[in-house]
Structures are given as C-alpha cells and as structure tokens.
Image (cartoon, helix red, strand yellow):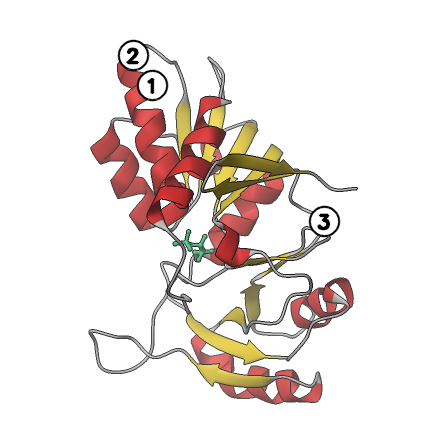
Amino acid sequence: MKTPGGSDAAKRRAGEHAADRVTDGDTVGLGTGSTAAHAIRSLGRAVDDGLDVRGVATSYASRDLAREAGVPLADLDAVERIDVAIDGADQVSDDLALIKGGGAAHAREKVVDAAAARFVVVVDPSKEVPVLDRSIPVEVLPDARTTVRRAIRELGGTPTLRAAERKDGPVVTDNGNLVLDCEFGTISDPGTLATGLATIPGVVEHGLFVDLADEVHVGRADGVTVRTPE
Ligand code: A5P
C-alpha cells in the first residue's frame, strides 16, 4: 500500500536526475510509481531530442506511460542485458535496503532491477528511514493465500490481504496473483527476513530488496543527494 506524502517536486528532481545519467545505446529498466514516472517522462523528452535508448517495463502502468512518452520498448525476455534500471521505493534504510510493492508491481520490478548492471533508486526524503518498518508486500499464488498467511505468522508477521479500491474483493496483480501486506514491526535484519519469505511455498515475490541498490537519488528542496552503499 502506498504511503501518501512526499513532494512531487522532490520526486521529479530525483527522477529527472537519474534519467539524465542514461547514455546513448542503454537498455533501461522502467520502474513503477509516481517517482519513476518522472524518469520515464524525462527519458521520453530525451528520446525526442535524439537519445537512442529502449525501455523494459516493470508493469502495465510503466509500459503505458513509456508508450505515451515515446520511449521505445523491448520485452524483458528479449533483451540480453539491462544497463540501468530506475525505480522508486516505499522505504529506504540507512544501509540502502528497500521496501517496494506499494503499487503491487514488485515481482516484475525485482526481476528487472536485479538484472540491471546498475540499479538506481529514486525517492523523495519521506521514504528515508534509519531502519525499515513498514509492511512488506508479498505477492502470492491465489490458492496459496491461506498456507502462506500461516507461514508468515510463524515468521512473526501479521498478514492482511490487500483490498482493491475501485473493485470489490482483493487487488489482483499484473501477474494474476494476490498481495498480502505483512507487518513485521521494525525490521532489523532484512536479509534474514527476505530469505524466510522467499522460501515459503506459494510466495511469488516479496517487496524486500536487500543488497540490490547501487545508487539512491534523493530529491530534496535544494537539489539531489546521491547515496551509495558503504
Ligand atoms: C510499485 O509497486 C512500487 O514498488 C513503487 O516503486 C513504489 O511504491 C514507489 O512508488 P512512488 O514513487 O509512487 O512512491
């Protein structure tokens, strides 16, 4: 689920800053969400000005936006290499672990972001926290939701099936699955929790992104800070 907040100007600064660093010939992973959308629009303007890139979408939403912005697209299964992925996040910790999936796109996002030679995260300062502590979106096979819920409780989490907002019933992802938002309180060891979640049968993908971010571009009132892993 999205946390409302964060200034659009800061998101735009971060998205455009990351897009400015894309170079001619790059294959670019196109993230999902309001911050990555600024990067996609900026890439579209650069393409109009002659930049030669192709995008790999992480969702229906990013694909549609890329088409509208004029960014040429390639299918994930048809590209040999992704040079850079630009994607948003719901939380970023001091050690650059992320929670993603507020828009239920984290499964495809993780495939694209992890495959990229360089994964650039774009956020506004409202996403920065010392330690991750928001609920973790977990995409599950629909028939496995009961068994996965039980396993998540055994890991110490409290799962809630994500409800759709303008449809009766649950959110259904781009992949046809459901999402459990799982509350774990303060997540002091995201690596261990990520492994625990990944090994539950029926989990398609979870929204903890650990040791994946190469750069985090934070849009601020007076510019952009680039954070890198220590
Ligand atoms: C999509 O499922 C998410 O992982 C988004 O990347 C994340 O929610 C960030 O979105 P915003 O930039 O809109 O906050």
Above or below, comparing residue 222 to residue 197 in the picture: above
Question: Disc 1 vs disc 2: Cβ atoms closer than 8 Å?
Answer: yes
Can residue 180 be seen from the camera position used here? Answer: yes
| Residue that protrudes farthest toward the top in the picture | 50
* Residue named by callout 2: 49
The residue located at (34%, 48%) in the rendering is 8
Q: Is residue 190 left or right of residue 5?
A: right
Image coordinates for residue 181, horizontal then vertical, percent: 50, 76
Q: Quadrant of the C terminus?
A: top right
Q: Residues within 10 Å of mark 3 (few under 14, many from 20)?
A: some
Q: Which residue is mark 1?
A: 46
Residue at (47%, 36%) from the top-left corner?
222
Of mark 1 and mark 3, the one earlier in the sequence is 1
Q: CA distance from mark 3 to mark 2?
A: 35 Å
- The earlier-in-sequence mark between 3 and 2 is 2
Task: In the rendered view, tell whether residue 149 sits above or below residue 61.
Answer: below
- Quadrant that contains the N terminus: bottom left
Name the side, left or right, on which 35 lies relative to 230.
left
- Label 3 residue near ligand 1, CB within 8 Å: no
